[in-house]
Image: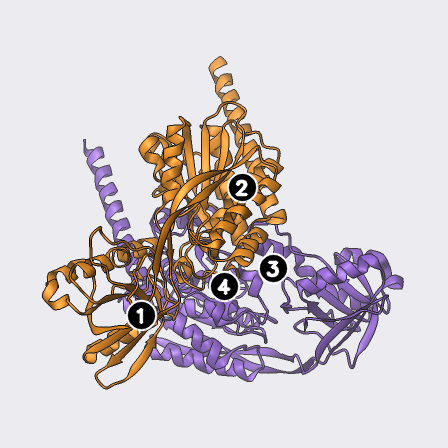
Chain colours: A purple, B orange
Amino acid sequence: MKVLSLSLLICISAISFANNDSLFIRKIYDEALENGQAYQNLRSLCKDIGARITGSAEAKMAVVWGEKLLNSYGFDKVYLQDIEVPHWERGTKEAAWMINEAGEMEKLHVIALGGSVSTKGMIEGEVIAVESIDELEKLGEEKVRGKIVFFNKAFDQKLIQTFKAYGGCIAQRHMGTNAASKLHAKGVVIRSLGSSTDHHPHTGSMHYEAGVDSVAGLAMSTMDADKLNEWLAKGKVIIRMETDCKYFPNEISHNVIAEMNGSKDNKIITFGGHLDSWDVGEGAHDDGAGVVHSIEALRILKKLGYKPQHTLRCVLFMNEENGNFGGKGYAKWAKDNNQEHICAIETDRGGFLPIGFDIMGTQEQVELVRTYKNLLKDVQLYRFDPGYSGVDIRPLTEFYPEMIQLGMAISSQRYFDFHHAETDVFENVNKRELHLGAAAMAAMIYLMDKSL
Amino acid sequence: MKVLSLSLLICISAISFANNDSLFIRKIYDEALENGQAYQNLRSLCKDIGARITGSAEAKMAVVWGEKLLNSYGFDKVYLQDIEVPHWERGTKEAAWMINEAGEMEKLHVIALGGSVSTKGMIEGEVIAVESIDELEKLGEEKVRGKIVFFNKAFDQKLIQTFKAYGGCIAQRHMGTNAASKLHAKGVVIRSLGSSTDHHPHTGSMHYEAGVDSVAGLAMSTMDADKLNEWLAKGKVIIRMETDCKYFPNEISHNVIAEMNGSKDNKIITFGGHLDSWDVGEGAHDDGAGVVHSIEALRILKKLGYKPQHTLRCVLFMNEENGNFGGKGYAKWAKDNNQEHICAIETDRGGFLPIGFDIMGTQEQVELVRTYKNLLKDVQLYRFDPGYSGVDIRPLTEFYPEMIQLGMAISSQRYFDFHHAETDVFENVNKRELHLGAAAMAAMIYLMDKSL
C-alpha cells in the first residue's frame, strides 16, 4: 500500500512538473507568435545593413547593430569579444562565357568562390568535366594542365535532408580549385551547390593548400551547368572567365555576447548563430535568422520573468563563413578563462519551419532531450535524433567533451534554394516560421537550464 | 522451445514485412524526388489554365486538362462524373474607398466575397465595426440599418496550427454578410482571413439565407483593416464601395476520375483534391497542389509496378470552393451504385511540407495508422493524430460510417498568406515540398491498401 502511494506521489509530482513546463512553453510560444520581434529585427539586419562578410564595413555595422539591440533589451551583461578575422573581397569583375565548336557563345551566371584568387585579367581554356577530385586526380597533370576544370557534381535530389545532398557536393567547392591548381589547370568552374534549377549561382568557402600555385574558382548557376553539359555532349567547349578577387590584411572583429545571470551557479549554456554572412544577398536565412532567433529567445525568457539556474549566454559569432575564427576563438577564450560550459545550442539552418533538435552527445544525453518529446510535440517539434550541432559551437567539444550540444533542426527543403546566393534576402523569410524558430530555441534553452 | 521458435518466426516475418514496406516507400520517395512530375503538372495547370471557378471557361479547360493528363498515364480507367454546379461571376467593378472626418480618403484593396450580390452602383455609408455576428445582432437593427458593417476579427496568431485561427474567423466571412443583410445594413466589409499583414485581400465562400434582402460583402486587405481601425479610433469613417457580381444558371461540370484495378476485390480507396479554385490567383496551393499530388501518387504506384489489392481511385473533385457539389455528388453516386468504400484520403492544405496525416475514425483506426509511425519517421512524417479529413471526402461519412478517412497534414504556416488571394500562384510553391507531398500520399495509399 505504501509503495503504491509513493509511486502515486511521484507520478503526480511528475505530471505537475510536466504541466508547469508545458504552461511555460506555451507562454514562450504565445509571446513569440503574438509579440515577436525577430522578424522586425531581421528586416533591420537585412535592409539597414545587408550582406556582411568579415572585413567589410557592413560586418562592422553588424557588430554595432547587435551590441545596440542587445543593450536595448537590458540583459545582465552585453560585451564584445575580439576575434582576428580574414578580409577577402570579391572585387569588381566577375564574368564568364562559354563558346562551342559551332561558335555559339553564352554568358554564364557566375560568382567567385569565397577566397578565390584573381584571374589577373581574362583567361580562356578548354573545358574538362569531372564529377569529383578523385576523378580529376586520376586524369593527371598532362590532361588537366592549361584546361578549365568543370566540377559537375549535382545535388542528389533523392535525399530528403538536403544537408546530406550538400555534404555530397561540398568537396568540389571547398577543395576542387586547390586540386585543379596543383595539376596546373588554368581555372575552375563548378556547378553551384543548390537544390533548385535556376540562374542564381551560389558562392561559399574554398581553400588552397600552402604553397600551391593557385588559380581562380567560380560557381555557375545550375541551369548554366545543365547547358554546359548539353554542349559538352556534342563537342569541345571553351570557357572565358575573369575575376579580380583580393586578399587584405587580417582585421580585428568581434563576437557579440549577451548574458542573463544564473541564480544557482556560473555554469554556462551558450546558444547562438553567426552574425557574418557571405557578400551577396542579405544573409537572411544564413544566418540572420539564427542571429534573431537567439536574441529573441533571450528576450522572451527575460520578458516572461524567467530566473535561470545557469548563465544563459547568447553569442552572435563572427566569421563562420570563411574561417570560423569566431567559433574557434570563443572556445579557446572560454577554456582559457575556466568557464564551465554544460550545453551549447546553435541555430544556423535558416528561418524555416523548426522540426526538432539534432543532438551531439552520449546516448544518455539523447535520452534526456527525448524526455521532453511529448511536451514538445504540442508545439509541433518532432525530431530528437543524434546529429550535428553547428559550425560555431563545434570547437567547444575539444575543451568540453562532456557537454551536450544541440543543433536546431529546421525543414531543409528550401534552404539550398537561397544558401550563399543573391536570393537569400528578407523577402524569402516567413514571419511565422521565423518566430516558431525563436520559440523553439527559447523552449530548449529553458528545458536544458532546468535539466542540467 | 516450439513456442519460442514460433514467436521468433512471427518476429522475423514482421521485420521482413516492415523492411519490404520501408524499401517500397523509399522507392516511392526516390521516384517523386528524382523523376517527379507534380511540379511540371502544376505549372501547366496554373499557367496554361489559371484560376478555375465552376462555371468559368477555365473550369471547363481544367476538366479536359485532367482527363487528358490521366489518360496519358495509361491508368486502367479514366472517366468523368457529371456534377451540377453553381455559376457566379465577380463582374468587372470592384472598388472601395474610406473617408474620415478630416476629409482624408484612401482607396482600399478589396475583393468581393464569393457569392456576393451586386451593390447595383456605388453605395456609401458610415462604418460600424464589430468582432462577431453575435456582437452585431446585439446592436440590433436600429444601429445597423443603413450602415456599412465592418467585421473586424483578426487571426489569433498564437495558434500554431493556422487552420484553427482560420476556423476562429470563418463565420464573419461565411455568414457575416447574411447577418448584416437581415438587419438592413447597406453593405459589408470584412478583414481578410489571412495570416500576414499585407495588401492582398482574400475572397472565399459566403452564404445568404433564403428570402433575405441581400447586400454585398467585400474583404479588404489586413493592412487596410489595420488602417481603418486607426481611423475609427479617432472618429467616424465613411466607406464607398461598388461591386457588380452576378449569378447565372447552374451548369453541368464534372469530377475527373482515374482508377487502378484491385487484384483482390472491388473495395475502393478514394483519394484526391479539388480541381476548381477561386477566381483569383492561380489556385496553386488551393488546390492545384492537391490535384497534382493525387495524380502523381497514382502515377508513381503504377510506375513502380505496384499491384493494389483494392481499387485505387484518384478523384479530382469539382466545386469544393462554392458549394461542394462535387464531394456531395460523389458520395451519393458511390452509395447509389453500391460501391464499397473502405478508405478516403484528401490533400487540400497546400503544396507545403507534409508532416503527417490527420485521422478521422475510431481509436482502432488511429492505432492502425500509427503502426507505421516508425516507417514514416524515416521519410520525415511525424504527426498521426485524430483530426479532420477534408471537405471533398467528408460527405462519404454519411454513407460509409465505418470507413477510415485521412487528411494529409501539411505545415500550415504559410498557407493563409496565399489562400484565396491573388498571390496563390505557381511561383509560391516549392518543388521539393510539393514532391514530398505526392510521395507522402503515395506511401499512405500503399500502406492503407496493404492493411485494409
Q: Give coordinates of residue A28: x percent, y percent.
A: 31, 61
Q: Nearer the viewer, mark 3 or mark 4?
A: 3
Q: Nearer the viewer, mark 3 or mark 1?
A: 1
Q: Is residue B49 above or below residue B11?
A: below
- Is residue B138 found left or right of B342 in the rendered image? left
Q: CA distance from mark 3 to mark 1?
A: 44 Å
Identity, as a three-letter code, of the amino acid under mark 4: Gly
Identity, as a three-letter code, of the amino acid under mark 2: Ala
Q: Secondary structure at mark 1?
A: strand
Residue designated by label 3: A196
Q: Secondary structure at mark 4?
A: loop
Residue density around tag 2, few if under 14, some if 14–19, many if 20 or more, within 10 Å: many
Q: Secondary structure at mark 2?
A: helix
Same chain assignment for discs 4 and 2: no
Q: CA distance from mark 4 to mark 1?
A: 44 Å
Q: CA distance from mark 3 to mark 2?
A: 22 Å
Q: Nearer the viewer, mark 4 or mark 1?
A: 1
Chain letter for mark 1, please: B
For the point 73% across and 62% down, the residue is: A227
* Mark sitting on residue B242: 1
Chain letter for mark 3, please: A
Identity, as a three-letter code, of the amino acid under mark 1: Glu
Q: Quadrant of residue A152?
A: bottom right
Identity, as a three-letter code, of the amino acid under mark 3: Ser
* Mark sitting on residue B297: 2
Q: CA distance from mark 3 to mark 4?
A: 16 Å
Residue designated by label 4: A350
Q: Quadrant of residue B306?
A: top right
Chain letter for mark 4, please: A
